[in-house]
Each structure stands twice: as structure tokens, then as C-alpha cells.
Image (cartoon, rainbow, N blue to C red):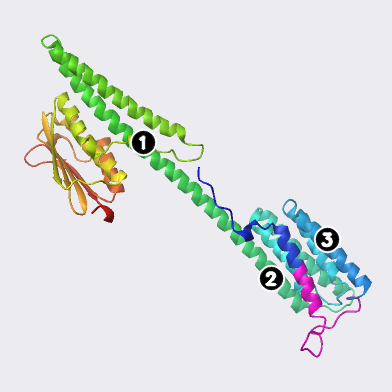
Amino acid sequence: MHVAPPPPFLKRVPPGVWTTVTWCAGVAFTVLIRVRLPGESMSAVPAGVLVFRWDGLTYLGVATGLVLAGSALLPRRPLRALTLFLAASVIETLPLGVGEIPLAQFLAVDVALYFIASTRARRTGVVAVACALAVLAGYLTTRLLCGWSVGTSAELAVAMTTVIAWLVGHSVHQAREHAGKLVALATAQAVTDERLRISRELHDVVAHSIGVIALQAAAAGRVIETQPGRAREALGEIETVGREALSGLRRMVAALRQAEPGQPPQPAASGSAPGLADVDRLAATVTDAGVRVDVRWLGERRPLPADIDISAYRIIQEAVTNVVRHAGTHSCEALIDFRDDELSIEVIDGGNGRGRPAGSGYGLVGMRERVGLLRGEFSAAPRPEGGFRVTARLPLPEGVR
């Protein structure tokens, strides 16, 4: 079982911690710009009458308490938490003597808006940004109705940062949804690909085995009276081939049962999959069934990647099975050529291949798909001199050349 690595540290920090830190930073900034710092002749912003008095500090304590309460509620009740943040930003303006809600006192609201828009439904995010903008507009309207001075330009800047915070959060939310859809699509595609692979494996195993069994049964039926020993050999071969086919089917069913819900099926163990090393045994089995298979090896035989090895064997198996079922001949030839940069496979028979259109049947389609997945070249067509030819060229990776 694979263990997922922990998320980055900043992603593990709860959103309530971010809003608390932002509020504290805003308060510190507000205080610092109202005191004369070293090197300054006077403070950047004149301090209000109540800023450093006990009543001003009381307002600050109440606002900070509201922020702490909202930070605790933010993961569970985001809109209620946002209401507390907005109330804190309004209360904090009382001792400052300003005509607008300063940006430093609204940054915690912006951070909360980002988390709401990025983690909650779109409707919740829209309601949150509308409430924030309504509080800004209501604050200015109230001061205008009371005949007090207002800072419209500064408040427009605060409103712009509010909208930007919501837009960034909404974009993150959309990106997360898109990533989830891509994962679901990739999982569905993986399931489809695995089903196609298993269907090809089923076709290869069952079609080849049934073809051999049919030939052996026909041979046993012809000699059962005159050559009982030969008939017993044929029946024994039928039993062997049937057991092998049943074993292959069981492996595939086991692979399907191992898959968890929503996950693509796991392939069978690599040790149970056939490869080119089994071609000689395949040829012997088909030869015993009545169709001689002459296997010719060219080039230097060397280990191949599992996907190429299995696909090469299945292509030869399916081509030989087609000879047994359709060619009406007693012999065929399989040529396996290990070249420098590719593996060439050719299966030739001298039967009545002219009556079979190229590309028909699931067997040829399966072979073509296998070769296509490996970026190779495939052809299957009648020979001018009679019979049928199946060829496949599979490119080899750099490490095998």
C-alpha cells in the first residue's frame, strides 16, 4: 500500500490561524503608523483621541475577541464567522477617528473570503462577498447620513481587494473541481483500458484453446476405433489444454476481484503471463493437434520488456489460432526476428487465406490494437501466391537495442 506524503506545512495550517495572524498584523501596522518611529519627525498618521486610552483599548479588545471567535467558527460556520470579522472591522474604526474602514482592519475579512470561496460552494462564496461589500457601502452611507466625513477613495481600494480575494479563491475552487474531474476521467479511462486488455486476453486464451480442443476431438473421433492409444493421447491433450485455459481464466477473474471499488482492476502477477519463451511449447501443442508450426528464430535473442514480450506471444498465438480455425491447412511458419531496433514477427500459412478479408474478426482487431499501443506496425492480408500472412514490427526501447 502506497502512503501519500503529508501536504506542505502551509497547507496544514488551519484557516482560522491565518485570519488571526492577519488581524494581529493589521493591528500592529495600525499602531506603528500612529507613533513616531526612529528617523521620523512625526508619525505617518495622526493618532485619534481614543487610540491609546483605556476606552480605545477596550474597543480593540472587543474586536480582537470577535476575530478569535470567528477564526474558531470559520471551518464549520463560514458565513457566521465572516459576520464576526465584519463586526470587528467596524468596531476597530471607532477609536481610530477615520472616515472609512482601513485596509489593515479589513485584511482578515479578505483572507476569510478567500477560504470561503476556495473551499465552499459557489453560492456561499457569492453571499460572502456580497455581505462584505454591503458592509463597506453601509458604513459610508451611515457616515454620509450623519453628516460626517468619509473616505470614499480609500474605501474603493478596500472593496477592490475584497473582490480580488473572492476571485482568487473562486479560481482555486474551479481549479480543484477541474482536477477532480480529470482524476475521475483518468480513472474511468484506466478501467476501460483494463477491460479491453482483459477482453483481449480472454479472446486469446479461449479462442486458441477451443481451436486446439476442436482439432484434438476431431482426431480422437477418427481414430478411436482403429487407434485407441492415439485417441487417448488426443483426449489427454484436450484435458491439458482445457486446464490451461481454465487456469488463465481464473487468473483474470482473480485480477478483477482484487480491484477495489472505483479503482482500475489490478493485472495478474507478471510471473503468470506468457512470453516468447513459451512459443516453442505453443508450437508443440498446435502441432500435436494436427497443424504443424515451424518456428524460426533470427537475430540475437535477448530479454524484452514485459509488455512487448507478452504482446509478441499473443500476436503469434492469435495468428496460429487463425490458421487452425480458418486456413484449412496442415502447416504454417512463424518467424521471430530480433533486429537492432525492433522485433519482427511473421506468421505465414499456405491455406485458403484469399477467402478471409483482412481486418475482419476480433482476433485481427486485437492484434492490431496490441501493436498500435506499442507504436509498431501491423499488417494482415492474403498472399499473392496463396495463403495468409500476418506481420508485426514492434520497436524496442533504447535499453534493449
Query: What separation in Å lies between label 3 and label 2 (alpha carbons)?
Result: 22 Å
Circle 3: element type: helix
260 shown above or below 22: above
Three-letter residue code for mark 1: Ile
Which residue sits at x=80%, y=91%?
41
335 shown above or below 376: above
- Mark 3 or mark 2, earlier in chain: 3
Q: Is residue 360 visible?
A: no
Three-letter residue code for mark 2: Thr
Which residue sits at x=76%, y=71%?
26
Q: Position of residue 121 (x, y in %)?
A: 65, 53
Write down the residue under mark 3: 66
- Mark 1 or mark 2, earlier in chain: 2
Write down the residue under mark 1: 198
- Asked if the residue at tag 2 contacts the one at tag 1, i.e. Cβ–Cβ closer than 8 Å, the answer is no
**Residue situated in front as seen by the camera: 372 or 255:** 255
Which residues make up the magenta segment?
Answer: 24-51
Q: Position of residue 395 (x, y in %)?
A: 24, 52
Q: Residue 161's mark? A: 2
Which residue sits at x=75%, y=55%?
79
In-image side of 372 versus 130 (left or right): left
Query: What separation in Å lies between label 1 and label 2 (alpha carbons)?
Result: 55 Å
User: Are there few (<14), some (14-19), or many (20+) residues within 10 Å of tag 2?
Assistant: some
**Residue situated in front as seen by the camera: 160 or 278:** 278
106 shown above or below 273: below
